[in-house]
Amino acid sequence: MRAGVALGVLLACAALAGCGGASSSATTAAARTQPAPLRVHGPTLVAAGDVACAPGEPRTRFACHQLDTAALIARLRPDAVAALGDLQYEAGSLADFQGSFDRTWGRFRDRMHPAAGNHEYGTPGAAGYFASFGTRAGQPGEGWYSYALGSWHVVVLNANCDIVGCGSGSPQQRWLAADLVAHPARCTLAYWHQPRFSSGLHGPDAALAPLWRTLQRSGADVALSGHDHDYERFAAQDADGRLDRTHGIVQFVVGTGGKSHYPILLARRNSRAHASVFGVLALTLGRGAYRWRFVAEPGVGFRDGGTARCH
């Protein structure tokens, strides 16, 4: 993060009495959550992005907590880890991956499914990222792929739209449409780095609307992103941000993997919970339903959790 942006973040944090505190303690359910909690059993997916500081950068109250979030993942013992991009700062070089990310989150590589962030492209072609993860990151030059987790179909996209293209008719959008047809599932989850909707400093990214529409047409249920260094949950929405309890997608922003905090100064429409904290999102993916729980670092009072049915 550039020095000017970093100073702006620190000033905003000071105005909010520190970015370490939660901006919400909401535990309200998502738009499709049932009145009574569902009994959900299935594999667990843990997710977060915006993870590892450069090797040697010191841990402070508001930065470089990648070792702490790795400890949360180890405690949760998930079946899969969704690494939501910007996994290694500042430019995603292979040497930095080996010197920082690998020494913290690297212990979960055997169950990790990464998405490419914008900082990965600080190295041309995201070469360090693709060299670090190999075939687990999809094809170099693309970075999109899918996998099954229990009864769920999971899609990983590349939201660096100015580099790989996200528009209608783009190679990625055509691949996504074909993949969803080839893998029909009652429940579908997708993730990528830059969020379609966000109340954070980066804000929403309209370039992702064609991919969102493609997912929604196939009945996708949940979308995960990082990029803004905060946690936020939105109610089910369509690609234009309109509340849609029947066909909309519930989005979580989980840029809480350790790098730093961003404040949320004003929550956008349909935002249901948010906080500037470090932590991970734990999702239990059951047959026809899911349970979510945000797990913050010890000593942080913020909680957000609930259950919902798939479409």
Image (spheres, grey):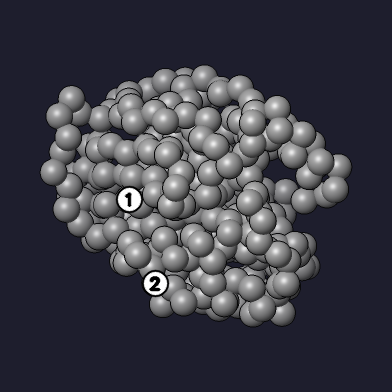
Amino acid found under the numbered disc labelled 1: Leu
Q: Examine the rendering and report whether any part of residue 52 can be seen.
A: yes
Q: Within 10 Å of the Cα at label 2, are there few (<14), some (14-19), or many (20+) other Cα atoms?
A: some
Q: Examine the rendering and report whether any part of residue 176 can be seen.
A: no
Q: Horizontally, is 250 left or right of 1 in the view?
A: left
State the SS at label 1.
strand
Residue at coordinates 73% horizontally, 72% vertically from top-left?
56
Percent position of residue 250, x then y: 40, 35
Q: Within 10 Å of the Cα at label 1, are there few (<14), some (14-19), or many (20+) other Cα atoms?
A: many
Percent position of residue 39, x then y: 13, 43
For the C terminus, which image quadrant?
A: top left
Measured in 3D between alpha carbons, the distance from the residue under mark 2 to the one under mark 1, in whole angstroms, is 15 Å
Q: Which residue is mark 1?
A: 283
Percent position of residue 40, x then y: 17, 47
**141 or 194: nearer the viewer:** 194
Percent position of residue 53, x then y: 68, 63
Amino acid found under the numbered disc labelled 2: Arg
Tally of marks: 2
Counting residues from the start of the chain, the first of labels 2 and 1 encountered is 2
Mark 2 in CB contact with mark 1 (< 8 angstroms):
no
Residue at coordinates 58% horizontally, 42% vertically from top-left?
20
Q: Which residue is mark 2?
A: 111
State the SS at label 2.
helix
Residue at coordinates 29% horizontally, 58% vertically from top-left?
44
Quadrant position of residue 4? top right
Measured along the vertical axis of the image, is residue 247 above or below residue 99?
A: above
Quadrant position of residue 129? bottom right
**238 or 117: nearer the viewer:** 117
Quadrant position of residue 171? bottom right
Q: Horizontally, is 256 left or right of 153 in the view?
A: right
**309 or 70: nearer the viewer:** 70
